[in-house]
Image (cartoon, rainbow, N blue to C red):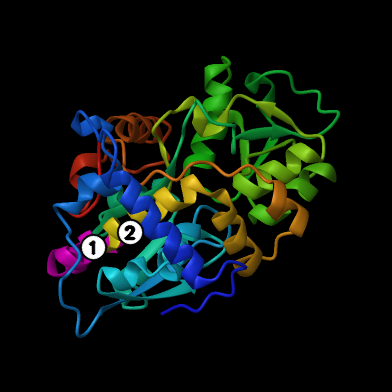
Amino acid sequence: MITSRTTRSLGAVAGLAIAALTLSACGDGPTSPDDASAADRQTDAAPAPEDCDTPDELTVVRTLSTAFEILYIADDAGIFEKHCLDVTINLGATDTAQNIPMVLNGEADVAYSDPAKILGAIAQGLPIKVAVQHAAGDASQEVADGVLLPPGSPVETGADLEGRNVCVPGLGGWTEMLARWAVDVDGGDHTKVDLVALPGATLQESAETGACDAIVPASIHYATALEAGFTRLHNGTNDFPGLPTMAAAVSTAWAAENADVLARFVQALAEASELANADVQLVRDVDAEHTQLDPEVVATRFIPKFQVELDIAATQEAVDLMYEYGIFSAPVDVAAAVADGALTK
């Protein structure tokens, strides 16, 4: 099990878990399947084992800075243990695309990445599946990613980015799609934009020094750039409601052999997401322990709601656009790309 030194004790977090689950069982209750929580909808498919002499071991590779916190919340609250899982959480690569092969070479059972990179790997024929998502575009929430312009930029619309450098944290992901779409939707030619891949942590400085005319950061890096005076061009993934912004991959073979284990893992994350959404301080505690963020950023940054149910139709719309833009080498059937244990809608 992962040992976390978050500011809340294990007992306190576990108490919240019990309280949340108790509340979900009381009151009027859901009147339709759509009203039920993600955790409730998954319970019948993945009940917690009554006896657990030997927990199933899982090695998980997480991202460095985006929407990973419910992994630690599930561990600290004893939710993984309740579902007879012994989960080891390892840090992944800066370029999350490099995490994906780990589920094929035995380094990991579950690997988190940009969902677009997972689906792009499937388009290339890799034998992997989408296992679970952690977050998705939601127009009702604060914008947390997308194209940003540095202070004093002469750019007024996406079409003005033709012939300019747009820096993204990696090619082949949603950030590349957002950059191309921002140009396309404003009447420009997305093929005339010069896309440059840089580490997410360097995007802001690169734009401030003039190396990038626009950047496409996400999450923490997006928030810090806004605070530094960058301005927004469109609304990032919020312009694509339901688009998954963080997800995990498993190998097709592993998913087939460990369907019950995967279902219990997803169920545990569904329960942890409810805790996190009810108390964002739990997320901030994980950030304080497991990132190198400035304490002020940890204390004040906007934290999007965790969403573990993948919207098939919304994802398919974006995947089709990725193929149209030439980012994907082949079309992808999203429904077929999702593992049986995943939660979908």
The residue lying toward the viewer, choosing from 225 and 117, is 225
Determine the image quadrant of residue 9. bottom right
Residue furthest toward the front? 27
Q: Mark 1 falls on what kind of element?
A: helix
Magenta stretch, overall SS: helix
For badge 2, the amino acid type reads Ala
Q: Quadrant of the C terminus?
A: top left
Residue 23 pos. (x, y %): 34, 46
| Dot in front, 2 or 1 | 1
Q: Residue at x 37, y 78 (%)?
A: 107
For disc 1, the marked residue is 264
Distance between the Cα atoms at labels 2 and 1? Answer: 15 Å
Q: Residue at x 78, y 42 (%)?
A: 207
As displayed, is residue 186 above or below residue 53?
above
| 334 magenta-colored | no
Residue 36 pos. (x, y %): 26, 37
The residue lying toward the viewer, choosing from 226 and 33, is 33
| Dot placed on the residue nearer the N-terminal end, 2 or 1 | 2
Q: Residues within 10 Å of mark 1 (few under 14, many from 20)?
A: many
Residue 239 pos. (x, y %): 50, 25
Q: Is residue 247 left or right of residue 225?
A: left
For badge 1, the amino acid type reads Arg
| 255 magenta-colored | yes
Q: Quadrant of the N terminus?
A: bottom left
As displayed, is residue 270 above or below residue 60?
above
Residue 204 pos. (x, y %): 75, 46
Q: Residue 335: in sight, yes or no?
A: yes
- Identify the magenta region: 249-264
Q: Residues within 10 Å of mark 2 (few under 14, many from 20)?
A: many
For disc 2, the marked residue is 249
